[in-house]
Image (cartoon, helix red, strand yellow):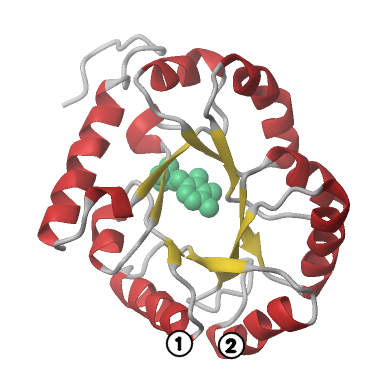
Amino acid sequence: MAPENPSPITAHLPSGLATVEQDIARACKEARRDRTSVSLIAVSKTFGADAILPVIDAGQRLFGENRVQEAKAKWPGLISAYPGIALHLIGPLQSNKAREAVALFDAIHSVDRPSICEALAKEIGSQKRKPQLFVQLNTGEEPQKAGVAPGDADGFIAACREKYGLEISGLMCIPPLNDAPAPHFALTAKIAARNGLPNLSMGMSADFAIAIAFGATHVRVGSAIFGHR
Ligand SMILES: *Cc1c(COP(=O)(O)O)cnc(C)c1O
């Protein structure tokens, strides 16, 4: 049970982070995986520095944001104040934001169309920065959702590599809200394996333990750490 009248700053922290850490450790053990094979991305979207600072103080250094503009407003100051912070873009990217995204983020999880590949290739070349790239899959083939359809994934990954010269590090997926996530994680892992991709960005607050069982290397956890948005 949540405590009554929790303070907005301390209610979920750092106890949320500690609980998530414990759950990741347990899931790794059950899957006979080393804890170091899973990176926890603390998804801080919508939260300000007052909520983020206790998580940094607790030792967390990897954070995720879903909007370029919001991240630009929040993170440069924190990044210069706290060495070792890495920032991942987990939300959709527009081509006209590619310059800012490559400048700020250490990884981009939402590569999903040729125009983005082209814009990223150009910025990676001119900025001499090389964010880790994930191709986003739309495993549920939901029309409103970003991502490459599973049937187009092999061709898209090949185009990323051959046509745009991008180094793709892994795949990302967001299972449909009302589906069991396991088949989506399994499909993502299968497509990654046959394309020689080592990293899997999958699993959120509700399902990261299941994702770890299916090989997730990056779990994106927001509300379980920071509280409800
Ligand atoms: C917000 C978000 C998350 C984190 O979701 P929670 O349910 O709060 O853990 C993970 N991935 C993406 C792409 C998101 O936008």
The front one of 56 and 205 is 56
Mark 2 vs mark 1: in front: 1
Give left or right: position of 214 versus 80.
Answer: left
50 versus 69 height, above or below: above
The front one of 69 and 171 is 171
Q: Where is residue 48 drawn, in percent x and y?
A: 57, 20
Furthest-front residue in this view: 128
Furthest-left residue in this view: 30
Q: Is mark 1 within 8 Å of ligand 1?
A: no
Give left or right: position of 124 versus 149.
Answer: right
Q: Which residue is mark 1?
A: 194
Camera sees residue 48 = yes
Q: Which residue is mark 2?
A: 154
The image quarter containing residue 1 is top left
133 versus 115 height, above or below: above
Q: Where is residue 138 drawn, in percent x and y?
A: 55, 73
- Tag 2: residue type? Asp
Is tag 2's residue or tag 1's residue first in the polypeptide sequence?
A: 2
- Tag 1: residue type? Arg
105 versus 57 height, above or below: below
Camera sees residue 176 = no
The front one of 72 and 196 is 196
The residue at 38%/47% (across/down) is 39
